[in-house]
Amino acid sequence: MANQRGSAEQLLTFGCGEQIYAFDIISVTDIIEVPELTRLPMVAEHILGIMNLRGKVVPVMDFAARMGFPVPEYDSHSCVIVIDCEGTLLGVKVERVIDAEAYDSYDISPSPVDNSVITGYIMLKERRIAIIDCIALSEKSK
């Protein structure tokens, strides 16, 4: 599946409950084991705390809690996806990373809901994947 430039774009897919979500892989800087976090007082419940990533202080959110889902039991497959949101790093704790998937941007259906962190949906390998706007996710996490 190639776009007009002749190259496929990629998504990093991850699971939350039974649903599959994705970030544009360009925004992903790291995928790491769940680190030790420092809790912060008086922050939103979905903000788990901050971590040190190569000398940078990075806030970490729980994706499930942020989306309003029950917080899952995390296990050895759980990790933190670090995304770059216009120069600001944000850690997103997820149940599991699935894969990097090539896609054609013409196959994306826009989200029917305005002002959502989900920008659109795409069918890949007979799975519906919700594409997350990392900038909207980070702005609505403050």
Image: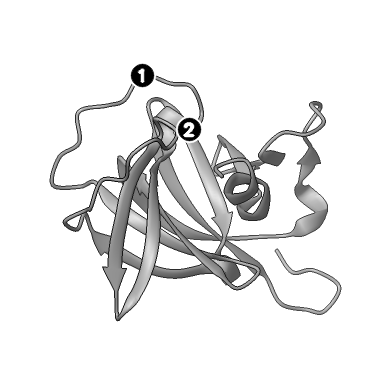
Q: Nearer the viewer, residue 46 or 82?
A: 46
Picture mark count: 2
Identify the residue shown where x is 74% and y is 69%.
Answer: 2
Quick one: label 2, few (<14), some, or many (20+) residues within 10 Å? some
Q: Which residue is mark 2?
A: 66
Residue 70: which disc? Answer: 1
Q: Using the image, determine if residue 82 lies above or below residue 38.
A: below
Q: Identity of the amino acid at label 1? A: Pro
**Real-space CA distance between mark 2 and mark 1, rounded to the nearest whole angstrom:** 10 Å
> What percent of the width, then of the height, locates residue 79?
27, 52
Residue 104: give x, y in percent of width and height. 73, 59
Residue type at numbered disc 2: Arg
Q: Residue 42 occupies which quadrant of the picture?
A: top left
Q: Residue furthest right?
A: 4
- Residue 70 in the image: state x and y as whole percent: 36, 19
- Would you call the spot at circle 1 few (<14 residues within 10 Å), some (14-19), or many (20 or more)? few
Q: Residue at x 41, y 25 (%)?
A: 18
Horizontally, residue 114 falls left or right of residue 46, namely right
Residue 11 left/right relative to 66: right
